[in-house]
Amino acid sequence: MSLKDEEASSMSFEPAQWTGYDDQYKNSMKQLTAIRMVWYENKLFFYLLTALLLIGFLPFFLLDKVSFLIWLKQWHHPLVDCMAPYWTWLGDGIMYIALLWMMALWRVSCRKLLIMGGGFVFMSIVVQLLKRVFYTHMLRPIALLPGDKALHLVDRVPLSKELSFPSGHSATIFLLVAVIQLLAENKNKMYSVLLLGLALTVAYSRIYLCQHFYIDVYVGAWIGTIAAVLVYIAVMQVNGPKWLDRSIYGWLCTHGKGIKK
């Protein structure tokens, strides 16, 4: 064998030797490309959200959670007292499930419903595990506030004492706005700003109503956002059956015809 043949042989490789590595590389690149596409298509939303979450980390260096809550509770208004108990319901799981049913009746595709429902299930599992398994000792504000501190409380709002961390309402509302942003065909910048404004006000209502500390709300926002992105990427990459991109009505019609035959 000549020198050139030896060099050519050393530079060549058998495809079978690299099949496993090649598949892993392709899969990792596919995931990376999907994340980049999600970011690019919704860049204003995620730029603003990332900035808010990074800036929102600063209070942890300044005050402990009880002192920061007392500082935030200095500002209150009768109009907010009237609105907050109702506004906070936008982050409740019942409202999310009701919206999911409305989307099904509105003939949204099964893929989109799967993203909405799957994101809610994933988020709920994470939140409940943290609340009921890992951080059961974390108490709510009313149980930890000093007795000599007279805070403004909204009338007729029952206050819980346990299962504080993280905030399920905050996780739910951030999941919802992230899913709406990801599934929306019209990526209007104003819509992105309004969605984030909605999420922030609902999350803040949990602090205003003295139901959660800031850290509960902050971590809940992260959980909801990450759950939405992960489930969206996973479901959108599924090359499943045709009914996946039809509405439930279309799936039932097709399935019904199959049964009749």
Image (spheres, helix red, strand yellow):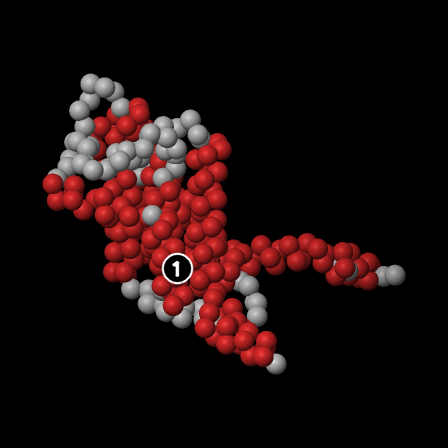
SS for callout 1: helix
Place residue 249 in its image quadrant. Answer: bottom left
On the rendered image, what quadrant is the C terminus found in? bottom right
Q: How many marks?
A: 1
Q: Residue at x 27, y 46 (%)?
A: 88
Pick whichever, 161 or 5, lies toward us.
161
Q: In this view, does 208 lie to the left or right of 25?
A: left
Counting from the top left corner in percent of width and height, residue 13 is at 76, 59
Residue extending farthest to the bottom is 261
Q: Which residue is drawn at 32% across and 48% down?
A: 91
Q: In this view, does 93 lie to the left or right of 155?
A: right
Q: What residue type is labelled 1?
A: Leu
Residue beneath disc 1 = 100
Residue extending farthest to the right is 1
Q: Residue at x 39, y 33 (%)?
A: 163
Seen in the picture, residue 12 relative to 85 is either above or below; the reply is below
Seen in the picture, residue 176 relative to 256 is either above or below; the reply is above
Confirm whether residue 81 shows in the render. yes
Pick whichever, 185 or 261, lies toward us.
261
Q: In this view, does 108 lie to the left or right of 8?
A: left
Q: Residue at x 34, y 44 (%)?
A: 169
Confirm whether residue 50 shows in the render. no
Q: In this view, does 28 lie to the left or right of 72?
A: right
